[in-house]
Image: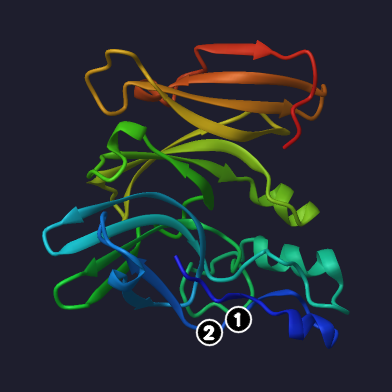
């Protein structure tokens, strides 16, 4: 993933930022054969974006399919010098009522990551892109899958779910739940896939979620999501274990920890 997030020491010397997101810059994805070298990379130009984390990549005929969590801007390195700091962040994190998630947006929702698909045709060089979820879904980041399907076509993915109100208040990413994505099941909203949400109690946020396969499991989603959660009202930190085949149910275990695990 080559996004227009540039590092420029010369810019820093002249009072600018070492790291800067070039919103008008080019973005591209490089595909390299498994046993290839640097000279065998095939670059595909894609719409400008900032994608740090991917679910998976796999081959589908002549196409390489890439699923990731894509945003239209970057929270790194933060506001420009002289801006009102946190006043800049909430504008781009807070959802605008009635405003769709479209590439044409200029300010609101730029930092919302949501699941996205690129299909890269290694024979013709063609690129097809689309959002995997609709406008009414929560922003999502830190994707994960059953690791046994890395590089193979998979049916399910999991993410942490952004809590919009807390983001807007603090200018920091907070995650108030988890999501299970069904890549092969369509939602009622045209072009989007089915999503299930496991949201936490009020003022409870998670970090560091991971998928753990069930030993001897027969299905791709036989396993658990394990994550640390912090209850801000009580200052208690717990580890939640959630059955991914029964994703909407209460956690199968909540283990209270002796100390805080930072977000």
The quarter of the rendered structure image containing the C terminus is: top right
Q: Is residue 190 visible?
A: no
The quadrant of the rendering that contains the N terminus is bottom left
Badge 2 marks a residue whose secondary structure is loop
Q: Position of residue 205 (x, y in %)?
A: 68, 34
Q: Is residue 152 left or right of residue 163?
A: left
Which residue corresponds to the image point at 84% horizontal and 68% vertical from the top-left? 85
Expressed as whole percent of the image width and height from the top left, the position of residue 224 reads 43, 22
In the depicted structure, whether residue 212 falls above or below residue 112: above
Residue toward you, 146 or 89: 146
Lateral position of residue 241 relative to residue 260, left or right: left
- State the residue in front, 248 or 117: 117
Is 146 on the left or on the right of 63, as rendered? right
Is disc 1 surrounded by few (<14), some (14 to 19) or many (20+) residues within 10 Å? some
- Identify whether 220 is placed above or below 163: above
Name the residue tied to disc 2.
25
Image quadrant assignment for residue 21: bottom right
- Image disc number at residue 22: 1
Label 2 Cα crowd, 10 Å radius (few <14 / some 14-19 / many 20+): few
Q: Which secondary structure lies at badge 1?
A: loop
Pointers 1 and 2 in contact (C-beta within 8 Å): yes
The residue at 23%/43% (across/down) is 152
Seen at 71% across and 52% down, the residue is 167
Q: How many marks?
A: 2
Residue 179 in view: yes
């Amino acid at each position: 993933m080559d996004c227009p997030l540039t590092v420029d020491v010369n810019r820093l010397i002249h009072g600018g930022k070492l790291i800067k997101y070039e919103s008008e810059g080019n973005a591209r994805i490089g595909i390299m054969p498994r046993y290839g070298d640097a000279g065998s990379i095939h670059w595909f130009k894609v719409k400008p974006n900032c994608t740090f984390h991917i679910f998976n990549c796999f081959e589908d005929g002549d196409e390489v399919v890439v699923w990731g969590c894509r945003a239209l801007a970057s929270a790194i390195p933060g506001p420009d010098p002289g801006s009102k700091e946190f006043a800049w962040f909430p504008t781009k994190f807070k959802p605008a009522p009635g405003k769709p998630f479209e590439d044409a947006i200029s300010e609101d929702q730029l930092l919302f990551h949501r699941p996205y698909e690129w299909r890269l045709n290694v024979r013709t060089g063609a690129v097809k892109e689309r959002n995997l979820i609709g406008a009414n879904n929560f922003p999502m980041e830190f994707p994960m899958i059953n690791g046994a399907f890395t590089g193979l076509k998979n049916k399910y993915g999991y993410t942490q779910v952004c809590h919009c109100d807390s983001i807007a208040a603090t200018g920091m990413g907070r995650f108030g739940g988890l999501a299970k994505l069904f890549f092969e099941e369509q939602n009622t909203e045209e072009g989007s896939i089915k999503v299930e949400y496991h949201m936490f109690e009020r003022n409870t946020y998670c970090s560091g979620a991971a998928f753990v396969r069930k030993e001897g499991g027969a299905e791709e989603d036989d396993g658990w999501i394990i994550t640390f959660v912090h209850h801000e009202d009580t200052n208690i930190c717990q580890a939640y274990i959630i059955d991914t085949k029964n994703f909407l149910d209460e956690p199968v275990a909540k283990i209270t920890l002796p100390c805080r695990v930072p977000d």
